Image (cartoon, rainbow, N blue to C red):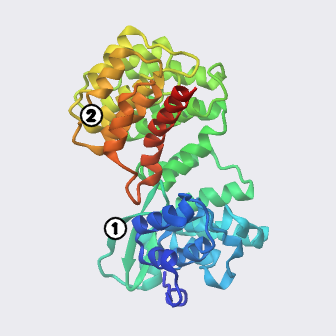
Amino acid sequence: MQTDGHASGAGDGPLAAAARAGDKLRVKQILEERDGRPYEGSDDATAAFTAAVQALHTDIADTLLRRGAQPDEVDPDALPSLREAVDFGSPALVDVHTLTGLRDRYPTPELIGMRDLARAWHEAGTEAELRRRTGSSDAVTRTRVQDDEYYTVGELTLGGMTVRDGHGAILTRLEEVLGIRTSCEELIARALERDEDHTAWGQAAIELSHRREKEVWAAAESLRADTDPFRRLFGAELMRLFELFADSHDEEFCVLAVAALTDWSAEETNSAVLAQVLYGLFSYQGPRAEAALLAHLGHHEPGVRRAVAAGLGTPLDRKHLSDAAREGLLRLMNDPDTGVTIAACRSAADVANGDPELTDAMAALLDHPERQVRLEAVHGLALHGDERCVEAANRLGPPRPGFHEEEYYCLEAAWRYEWHREKKART
């Protein structure tokens, strides 16, 4: 895809200039600085969004969309058309046209045509279609790029033309927009053409799990029994989302998912699949799920231990951990893997009952070499009403530029605790 007709930076303000340059950290910093209101929309957020799209920094465009940019206020000629977006193969760029106020610009026949274009790319294969269009037999240059805030796609360059390999995800998206019901088998096939970090995987999994139907559940169970761990991984993702999107723990598919995932956790031998299975028990936290998590407390893979730590918190209607869960979290807060320590600290914070064993363990992390661990410890202590959070928060100082949202969440809990403490002292 070429951007020569859109890429002028003349007259860009600081936010638009950073967006056009692909400097995501600077974009976040500027958004944070505006009027002291981090991440709120500003007058030139839409101009910055336009600049990001023109420069094909679709992940930055996605960030700006979530921070107040208004695509429907952009001159249509300033953005790549829907056809250009589909040809380019960027699901995020297609979402600009189909998830915002721009969607009303496209009549159904045009959307059907774009669906057919996406299908043609998908069925031919990105590289094969790229070779057909360029007529080049040279080697293809391949990279992996962030397409939106959450997912990545492949980017291929050949003969001066660059495209992304998100046509399968685009096809799924346009079918959804048109109200076309794609078969369960087809959606699974599209997902399994890519890996778990690709938009095609995530889009198919979310679409299927929202159906809440026996056909999809049967497919997930079939994937669970597959000999290929990659296929089992997608099955575990489906079951995890069945549980996650349930309206209540009593919902039929939530009950089925918890039972299946609990049994599955005792059988799975692949570490990546096992971690996904255990993440599926994250929000349920019943006795069987807890026992399943604790069975893998000492697993050799940090990813599995992170899933265990994440799942050992408590639901909102319970203020105490079981003795086994408490001992598990105390152990995991001292794990050599930083990610495990952070997950365990967050679960300990969920209890929020002043448990002295947990608060002492969190206080011991206030001198940890990793700033994120110290932030999580401050947050946990504040939720437990432990005054040690105040001095520790002061030592950490304000949130770092570009990381305001993540760090403010932790520090604000300590500031709120200190405010309530001082207010109580004055009365």
Counting from the top left corner in percent of width and height, residue 421 is at: 49, 29
Residue 70 in the image: above or below residue 356: below
Looking at the rendered structure, the kind of residue marked 2 is Pro
Viewer-side residue, 4 vs 270 = 4
Q: Residue furthest top?
A: 323
Q: Is residue 339 left or right of residue 68?
A: left
Q: CA distance from mark 1 to mark 2?
A: 28 Å
Q: Is residue 360 visible?
A: yes
Q: Earlier in the sequence, mark 1 or mark 2?
A: 1
Give the farthest residue toward the front: 426
Question: Which image quarter: residue 158?
Answer: bottom left
Q: Type of residue at label 1?
A: Thr
Q: Tell me: residue 371, above or below residue 159.
A: above
Q: Secondary structure at mark 1?
A: strand
Q: Nearer the viewer, residue 414 or 173?
A: 414
| Image point (52%, 18%), residue name | 259
Tell me where residue 398 appears, x and y as whole percent: 39, 51
Indicate which label's residue lies in the foreground, 1 or 2: 2
Residue receiving disc 2:
302
| Left or right: 125 as drawn, with respect to 270 | right
Q: Residues within 10 Å of mark 2 (few under 14, many from 20)?
A: some
* Left or right relative to 218: residue 143: left
Give the residue number, with chain letter if any, for mark 1: 143
Neighbours of disc 1 within 10 Å: few (<14), some (14-19), many (20+): few
